[in-house]
Image (cartoon, rainbow, N blue to C red):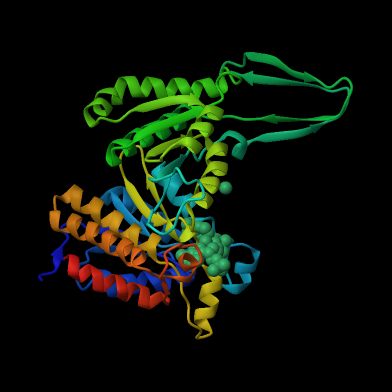
Amino acid sequence: MEKIKMPTPLVEMDGDEMTRIIWKMIKDILLTPYIELNTEYYDLGLVHRNETDDQVTVDSANATKKYGVAVKCATITPNAQRMTEYNLKEMWKSPNGTIRAILDGTVFRAPIIVNGITPLIPTWKKPITIARHAYGDVYKNTEMKVSKGSKAELVVTDENGAETRELIHEFKNSDGIVQGLHNLDESIGSFARSCFNFALDVKQDLWFATKDTISKKYDHRFKDIFAEIYENEYKDKFEKAGIEYFYTLIDDAVARVVRSEGGYIWACKNYDGDVMSDMVATAFGSLGMMTSVLVSPDGVYEYEAAHGTVTRHYYKHLKGEETSTNSVATIFAWSGALKKRGQLDNVSELVFFAEKLEQATVQTIEEGVMTGDLAALSNLPEKRKVNTEQFLLEIKDRLEKLL
Ligand code: NAP
Ligand code: MG
């Protein structure tokens, strides 16, 4: 078979620890034998971020804007312990945060579903993709403790110096607490467009929910912005694609999600997304089976696994011990990015390859060959736990039969 050619580069962001080891194995075993990989490579491993004063992260995000598609390996977000471990010049910020800020994107997280691993909610048959608005609300709040006898007011000064003032509460009988939140029409609009675009891309319904009955201005603004953008820019496209935009109250949404079959995108405000994404991920099974894609409002895509660098396995690997680390989410990050590249460039062989790679991966697990995390969850009668590399070789065997 002749290797598949890629006319446009894919932005490749390498990373850290066990996922860096897996990254190279996936390329060597599953990709480069079949594709003339055309990537623009950025090493986001912590050592190189430190050497470049984190400029490499900014460069990789700008390259993603330029080419439109990226694939990213998990990376360490430094903390105090990493400062000494890597002898860092500074406690560099989370690369994902930096990239998200430059692309102004929304993160969509979706589980990969396989037979033999049953979600804790048995009615869930198809993936539920969660989109979290990653700006503002309680994550950019101002809060105070208030002593008894105080009066708290909300004061807004406009550009001409005119004040609008509203009483929050008179703390007559008790000490208390107070909190100020904000969001931006612009950010909510970007979030809405990313969600509508992604729904069209994957041809799934989009659900959105807030508490607009209680929060008649704040949450209501989210509802209105989504509705306006939908009416003006997306209604026709949704109808043509045969998908639906559905708004409801957050508590109603939670009840409906639990009773549903899955198979839709659930757009969440920042806090709801933080909480609900952990709930949904846990109910679907393993972190190793959760993919993540960052989508900008102008349609730039960055694919990755939702999990981290799997540090504990990496330390075992360094000691020469055998590991059984799940590479599925990282494989799907690659297949997602290759498929998107193939679609944008009209290279049908690349799209076909990416689909077969996903199929071979799922088939491997469904035939009972899996890494330790899945073996602990799977209810298949016969299963075989394999190590990190064997799992990729098993996928390769099946992939070759499908190509
Ligand atoms: P983690 O790397 O996701 O791992 C937490 C635990 O979950 C692992 O120890 C392992 O459990 C299990 N696990 C996760 N992924 C797995 C996989 N693919 N296969 C098998 N088991 C898997 O999270 P963490 O330990 O909190 O963070 C480690 C580093 O990753 C940190 O430096 C953090 O900053 C970084 N991080 C990066 C990203 C990102 O780049 N997107 C996201 C999150 C965290 P067992 O040990 O029980 O086997
Ligand atoms: Mg959370």
**Residue at 46% of width from left, 74% of height from top?**
324
The quadrant holding residue 189 is top left
Front-lying residue, 153 or 227: 227
Which quarter of the rendered picture does the N terminus lie within? Answer: bottom left
At which x and y percent is residue 348?
14, 54
Left or right of 319 on screen, residue 365: left
Q: Residue furthest front?
A: 381
Is there any visible trace of residue 309 in the rendered image? no
Q: Position of residue 286 (x, y in %)?
A: 49, 58
Relative vertical location of residue 342 with respect to residue 124 in this rendering, above or below: below
Work out whether 183 lies above or below 23: above
- Between residues 25 and 323, which one lies in front from this camera angle? 323
Q: Is residue 309 above or below residue 101?
A: below
Rendered residue at 40%/38% (across/down): 265
Q: Is residue 119 above or below residue 262?
A: below
Identified at 38% across, 52% down, the residue is 61
Q: Quadrant of residue 198?
A: top left
Q: Residue furthest left?
A: 2
On the image, the x and y values in percent for residue 142 come to 68, 34
Q: From the viewer's perspective, is 371 left or right of 148?
A: left
Residue 339 or 366: which is nearer the viewer? 366
Q: Nearer the viewer, residue 134 or 132?
A: 132
Quarter of the rendering occupied by the C terminus: bottom left
What residue appears at the point 42 percent right and 31 percent down from the top-left corner? 207
Q: Is residue 92 visible?
A: yes
